[in-house]
Each structure stands twice: as structure tokens, then as C-alpha cells.
Image: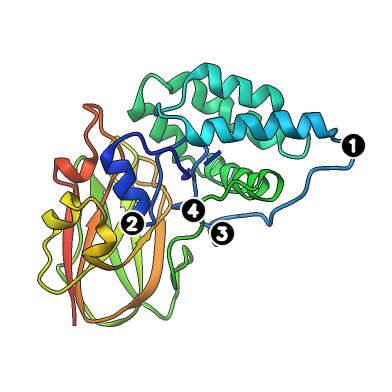
Amino acid sequence: MNHHHTNRPRAHQRRLARLGITATSLLALAACGSESKDAAAPTAPAATASASDVAAYCAVVKELNDSESFPPTADLLQRYRRVALDEIAPDVDLAVGRLVSSVDDPTAFFVAFADDEIEQALHRVDAYETATCGVEHDTGPGEGATTVLDANATRIDVTATDYAFAAPSTAPAGRASLVLVNNGKEAHFMGLSKLKPGVTMQEVMAAEDPSTVTDGSWGSDFAAPGGKDDEVLTLDLTPGTYALFCWVTGPTGQPHAMMGMQHEIVVS
């Protein structure tokens, strides 16, 4: 169902997708990744599934992936649930059951989306859809990154609130694990971009194609509110300026980054 991966009805969602941290369509946990918690390898449909059942399932998968509405409509999610093939039905039931009641409230939808059990189910769903229907989802936290804490790396603590990041303004070059704790009331995640020399965070947010003004982008999984759900992004930092963004949609329809949720880290 593309989590992270990926109908992108709004400009900021398209930017988020290009940054490699897509997180805005229902079963789009792809900013989330193959190395995330309990991600499963793709599996093929059982031989008992008829060709017509597979075709019906894949048709709804593609409709969901291409949907212009976000969150997806309750009707579309329920149709997806009804046609889910046996191998993936438990994960689809879990995800849709938790998410469908909040489709009219993006804030509540993202909070439900950030639950680790839902994230893990959606990772498996994404892998299954790719193997069965050929629908590609954005996978992984980004090139060279993982969502696993490295005990030998420099730890960079990042605290999210509504709507700001508290984090160091400088960091040493080398292997680093950024650890996000969400003390806000909404779901948040870390989108990390390395800015090209001379580029500002505002230019990244305004760019139609942020890849033209960045030298790499990565993303953590979603952190649920309440301060108990740590999310990690581990990667090699090279000298330069990095920016943290949260592109989750807020209650007014604006992305959190546009509401002040951005932070600059200079690496040397």
C-alpha cells in the first residue's frame, strides 16, 4: 500500500518523495525501509490464489497507490481489505482496521501510522505488493543508512515537539546514529538532507526538485507521540551542512517543516 509509499497529492508530499522520505500514502511505509524493524522479504502469492483473485487485488493496490486523496478514503481502504490475498490478509486487516477510522483526521491518521506494529505490518505489505503486483515502493532509510542503533557511532539525540526539533547544531564527521524521541502530541519523523554548498533550508523546501539542491537525503521511521518510541537513523556524515525536516501533515494541512520543524546541523 505504498507508507510510507506513495500517492503524493500535495507539493510537499512530492518533495518528500523526491527526498527519499515518503510517508504520506496509507500503506506507504517505504521512508521506512527494508532494514526497519521486522521487515520481511517479499513473498509470492500461494498457488491456491486464482489469477482473477490476484488481478483483483493488484488492481486495488494500484488504485490505492495512485490515489490523489490523502489519507485514502475509507471506501478504498475497505475495498483493499476485502480483496487482500490470504498471505497478506492478516497484515492488511491490522493496518486498515487501525487506520480506517481516522481517514478524516490526518493528525490521528499519522499517530496510528506511527505505531510500531502498524509500521512492521506495512513493511511486509509493501514487500508483498512489490513481489505480487510489481508495484515499486520507496524502500529503506536512504543510501548507506540503516534504522539500527550503532553502539560505536557518535550518538546525536534529537527531540521532537509540536513543531520543532531540539538537537545539536554541530556534529563530528563520521559514523553517527541520530536517535529521535517524540515528546509532542503528533507523530513526527526525521528527514535528513545534506545541503549543497551555499544552499539554505528554505531553498530546499521551495525547490520543485530538492535533489537539485541536496547531496543526499535519508529518513527515519515515524515516532509515535508520548516520548516512548525511539526511532534511529544511522549513517556516515561527511563535512557539510545537514538539515532535519519533518514533512508530516499538521492539523491545518501544512507540513510540520513549514510550521517551524526544521533544524540545521553543521558537520566538520
* Apparent side of residue 33 relative to residue 71 in the rendered image (left or right): right
* Apparent side of residue 62 relative to residue 55 in the rendered image (left or right): left
- Distance between mark 2 and mark 3 Cα atoms: 17 Å
- Distance between mark 4 and mark 2 Cα atoms: 11 Å
Residue 74: x %, y % from top left: 50, 18
Query: Which scheme is used to colour this image of the protein?
Result: rainbow
Check disc 1 and report its element: helix, strand or loop: loop
Check disc 4 and report its element: helix, strand or loop: loop
Residue 232: x %, y % from top left: 41, 61
Sequence-earlier tag: 4 or 2 = 2
Nearer to us in this view, 267 or 85: 85
Sequence-earlier tag: 3 or 1 = 3
Classify residue 129 by image quadrant.
top right
Query: Circle 1 sits on which residue?
Result: 48
Sequence-earlier tag: 1 or 2 = 2
Identify the mark at residue 19; answer none if there is no mark.
Answer: 2
Query: Circle 3 sits on which residue?
Result: 34
From what the image shows, is residue 143 above or below residue 102? Answer: below
- Distance between mark 3 and mark 1 Cα atoms: 28 Å
Judged by depth in the image, the label closer to the viewer, 2 or 3, is 2
For image coordinates 62% across by 29% down, the residue present is: 60
Check disc 3 and report its element: helix, strand or loop: loop
Judged by depth in the image, the label closer to the viewer, 3 or 4, is 4
For image coordinates 55% across by 30% down, the residue present is: 63
> Can residue 2 be seen in this snapshot?
yes
Check disc 2 and report its element: helix, strand or loop: loop
- Distance between mark 4 and mark 1 Cα atoms: 29 Å
From what the image shows, is residue 94 above or below residue 30? Answer: above
Residue 68: x %, y % from top left: 41, 29
Residue 149: x %, y % from top left: 45, 68
- Distance between mark 1 and mark 2 Cα atoms: 40 Å
Say whether marks 3 and 1 touch (CB < 8 Å): no
